[in-house]
Image: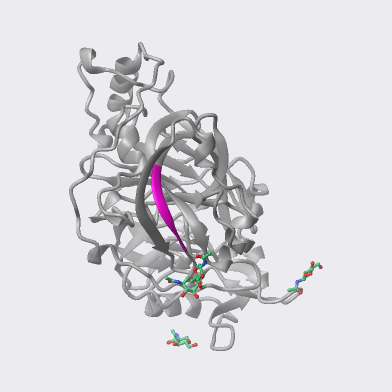
């Protein structure tokens, strides 16, 4: 979704486009790049993984049609830089031949992949790496106009093209947005652009397939998943974060993953069965999305009020435009908010609700959970940095969730 809250400012979300308003459409064929490295043991790997993760409903392809597996494990890991701290996270993606490296914010709340074109000279573009399509021998013109807007009011526009996009060694031909104009918000953003991980139904241009669609179709990944470890400055200094395409890192979570069914393909939407404080139900339920592109948790007003009622000193400030909590909450080691999905409750310690001081040196902090999102709740990075998430794009998609292990 890209609703980036940054230090000392709070961008509270209003959804710009509900997936409900975007009609599903049949796809346009996008040529796929086949990987020359034939993977001998791909089928064996798939069989092992299928046995280990029955929830994924893996189809093990018959021997003769196995082509294009990326590498031994069919996985690609993209290390992340934690910006903000914990405001947003970006990783490097190679585009074109020879590769031009773009720093992209991976976003499960949108579907487009885009970055500035070398022809873009607006303030938002100028400070970033810009992709020069002329220098890429694999670039193909598309020419359709493209534009996107995000929940924090930022937007970008340009034209579509296609090229080889590679994340952690997983490479497919991908339709990309080349921005020729960006709103000024991007001038201060550390990343060059966005890497959407949502479903194709929310692509800005109808018929464009997502990277996951293409990687799955090309059998470039061993599992149809992208697994997310967002680190936290409080817990580990913000180190070691990554997106793992095609695999699940079972050293990163405790217990078993609970696979929560996706209720609607667009965003990664699920049913949030309850919100609780220290295990006590707050009698709140809603559809919601797990969104790596949104910094905070932005939920229904009543649910946000019910949570803050449990926190001494919490106030809803008209002046600051949201819920504030004492910064001393960061030292709280016993209390937690939780959200129930797929019958399991997943915690966020209240320490993570002391999100950032409202001004330099202030003892009052913006809360990590805000209200105002009375339709779809958004469980953003504050949730994900406490819970390992496996976005599984099978025929019946689901999100595997388990407490994160640092
Ligand atoms: C970029 O878009 C803005 C409107 O959002 C417009 O005012 C401006 O002229 C555009 N700049 C270019 C170079 O197209
Ligand atoms: C893009 O963002 C700018 C700055 O927030 C705004 O002025 C402009 O109206 C937006 N354009 C569109 C098409 O949403
Ligand atoms: C918090 O304050 C805003 C106005 O700043 C108001 O719209 C909202 O209803 C309030 N929420 C609660 C739960 O009191
Ligand atoms: C806060 O303090 C830091 C250094 O102490 C300074 O660099 C920064 O500009 C200050 N920010 C504001 C908004 O005053």
Query: Measured along the vertical axis of the image, is residue 151 above or below residue 42?
Result: below
Q: How many marks?
A: 0
Where does residue 173 sit, x and y in percent of width and height?
Answer: 38, 34
Left or right: 129 as drawn, with respect to 299: right
Where does residue 9 sit, x and y in percent of width and height?
Answer: 61, 73
Where does residue 374 sit, x and y in percent of width and height?
Answer: 34, 76
- Residue plotted at (49% across, 34% down): 96
Question: What is the quadrant of residue 147 in the picture?
Answer: bottom left
Q: Can you see residue 251?
A: no
- Residue plotted at (68% across, 71% down): 328
Residue 290 forms part of the magenta stretch: no
Where does residue 120 sit, x and y in percent of width and height?
Answer: 55, 55
Residue 159 forms part of the magenta stretch: yes
Left or right: 397 as drawn, with respect to 36: left
Query: Measured along the vertical axis of the image, is residue 155 above or below residue 55?
Result: below
Q: Quadrant where the N terminus lies?
A: bottom left
Q: Viewer-proximal residue, 86 or 13? A: 13
- Figure colour scheme: one colour
Magenta stretch, residue numbers: 156-161
State the predominant SS element of the stretch in magenta: strand
Q: Viewer-proximal residue, 70 or 49? A: 70
Q: Quadrant where the C terminus lies?
A: top right
Q: Can you see residue 92?
A: yes
Query: Measured along the vertical axis of the image, is residue 304 above or below residue 197?
Result: below
Q: Viewer-proximal residue, 328 or 323? A: 323
- Residue plotted at (38% across, 39% down): 174
Left or right: 341 as drawn, with respect to 138: left
């Amino acid at each position: 979704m890209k609703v980036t809250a940054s230090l000392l400012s709070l961008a509270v979300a209003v959804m710009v486009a509900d997936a409900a308003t975007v009609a599903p459409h049949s796809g346009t064929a996008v040529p796929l790049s086949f990987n020359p490295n034939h993977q001998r043991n791909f089928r064996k790997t798939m069989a092992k993984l299928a046995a280990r993760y029955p929830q994924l409903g893996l189809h093990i392809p018959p021997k003769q049609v196995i082509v294009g597996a990326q590498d031994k494990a069919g996985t690609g890991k993209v290390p992340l830089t934690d910006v903000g701290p914990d405001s947003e996270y970006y990783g490097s993606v190679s585009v074109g031949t020879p590769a031009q490296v773009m720093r992209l914010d991976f976003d499960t709340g949108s579907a487009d992949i885009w970055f500035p074109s070398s022809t873009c000279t607006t303030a938002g573009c100028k400070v970033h790496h810009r992709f020069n399509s002329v220098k890429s021998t694999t670039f193909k013109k598309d020419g359709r106009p493209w534009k996107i807007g995000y929940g924090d009011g930022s937007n970008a526009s340009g034209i579509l093209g296609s090229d080889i996009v590679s994340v952690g060694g997983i490479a497919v031909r991908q339709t990309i947005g080349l921005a020729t104009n960006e709103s000024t918000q991007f001038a201060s953003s550390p990343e060059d652009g966005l890497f959407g991980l949502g479903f194709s139904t929310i692509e800005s241009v109808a018929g464009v397939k997502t990277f996951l669609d293409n990687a799955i179709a090309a059998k470039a990944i061993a599992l149809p998943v992208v697994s997310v470890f967002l680190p936290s400055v409080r817990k580990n200094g913000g180190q070691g974060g990554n997106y793992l395409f095609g695999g699940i890192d079972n050293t990163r979570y405790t217990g078993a993953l609970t696979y929560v069914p996706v209720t609607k393909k667009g965003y990664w939407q699920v049913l949030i069965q309850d919100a609780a404080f220290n295990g006590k139900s707050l009698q709140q339920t809603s559809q919601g999305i797990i969104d790596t592109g949104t910094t905070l948790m932005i939920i229904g007003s009543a649910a946000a009020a019910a949570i803050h009622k449990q926190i001494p000193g919490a106030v809803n400030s008209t002046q600051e435009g949201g819920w504030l909590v004492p910064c001393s909450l960061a030292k709280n080691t016993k209390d937690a908010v939780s959200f129930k999905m797929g019958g399991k409750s997943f915690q966020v310690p209240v320490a993570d609700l002391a999100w950032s001081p409202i001004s330099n040196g202030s003892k009052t902090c913006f809360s990590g959970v805000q209200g105002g999102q009375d339709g779809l709740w958004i469980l953003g990075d504050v949730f994900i940095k406490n819970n390992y998430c496996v976005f599984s794009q099978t025929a019946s998609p689901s999100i595997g969730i388990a407490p994160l292990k640092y």
